[in-house]
Amino acid sequence: MRAFLRADRLVRAARVGELAPILNPPAIWAAAANYKAHQAEMQAKMGSSDRSNLSKDELMAEFFLKPASSIIGPGGPVILPKISKDVDFECELCAVIGKTARHVGEEQALDHVFGYTILWDFSQRDPWGRGRQNTRNIRKGFDTFTGLGPWIVTRDEIDDPQNLAIRVEQNGKPAMSAHTGDMICTLREHIRFLSDVTTLMPGVLITTGTPAGVAKLADGDHLKGGIEKIGEMEVEVRAER
């Protein structure tokens, strides 16, 4: 079922095309470097560190937080800040927590999920990003840098979040084609790890990292991203005036 989540005052319903399905989540937890192919492209593009020898928990310790003030809905626009000459898109499967989770095992992890949506994690790559990881909260925290939508598909509609195709078009041309089965750490592992760190409240978002295929954005770009069984979300890109 396509739905908009309501959880007390933490989240509000939205109108598709105008607002995101969640406007004020308690937290947005974002996984980093969760696809091997994306790790490789970031090493080549940004001088990122080699993570091939990290355990899964060591990799998940790179989770970062995005501010709710960065959320936009379908259509956008995402605004490219004047300070940066290199902003790119990341398109990710995002889970919405529906039941409080604390010290949850992997077998029970998905029982705490309300549903799934698409999250665009827009990322500034300069001037603070090259070869540095401790700037993620800033580089990914600009206003409009978290696209959510087009709606939330409830958990019962998706048997396995690790069996979904992801695709993105940039200005009508294929830019990303991937599969959630290629994640290094699964959503079950993410929930287990994060729930051992903090209480996951209803409305918390956990976004699972981007596949390879991220690309630089320019004023006037049009993005269309889709995840199997969820739908498609389009975003317009504009330069800051």
Image: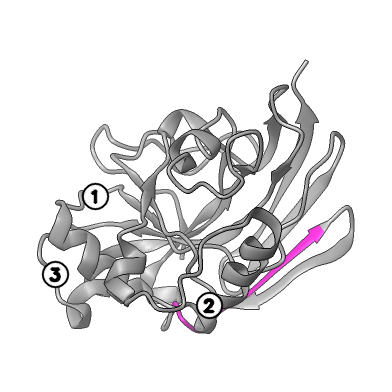
In the displayed structure, does residue 8 sit left or right of residue 54? Answer: left
Q: Is residue 162 magenta?
A: yes
Measure the C-alpha gap from mark 1 to mark 3: 14 Å
Upstream in the sequence, badge 2 or badge 1?
2
**Three-letter residue code for mark 3:** Val
- Is label 1 in a helix, a strand or a loop? loop
**Position of residue 134 measured from the top left corner of the image (x, y, whole percent):** 43, 43
Numbered disc in front, either 2 or 1: 2
**Position of residue 82 measured from the top left corner of the image (x, y, whole percent):** 73, 22
Q: Name the residue under label 3.
A: 104
Q: Is residue 180 above or below residue 149?
A: below
* Crowding near the residue tagged with mark 1, few <14, some 14–19, many ≥20 C-alpha atoms within 10 Å: many
Q: Is residue 2 above or below residue 111?
A: above
In the displayed structure, does residue 227 sit left or right of residue 157? Answer: right
Please, which residue is most extreme toward the left here?
103
**Position of residue 127 measured from the top left corner of the image (x, y, whole percent):** 65, 33
**Three-letter residue code for mark 1:** Pro
Q: Quadrant of the C terminus?
A: top right
Q: Name the residue under label 1.
A: 202
Upstream in the sequence, badge 1 or badge 3?
3
Q: Name the residue under label 2.
A: 180
Write the residue at 50% across / 69% down.
Answer: 50
- The picture quadrant where one finds residue 37 is bottom right
Q: Does the magenta stretch include residue 52?
A: no
- Is label 2 in a helix, a strand or a loop? helix
Q: Is residue 122 above or below residue 119?
A: above
The residues colored magenta run 161-169
Q: In this view, does 38 lie above or below 18?
A: below
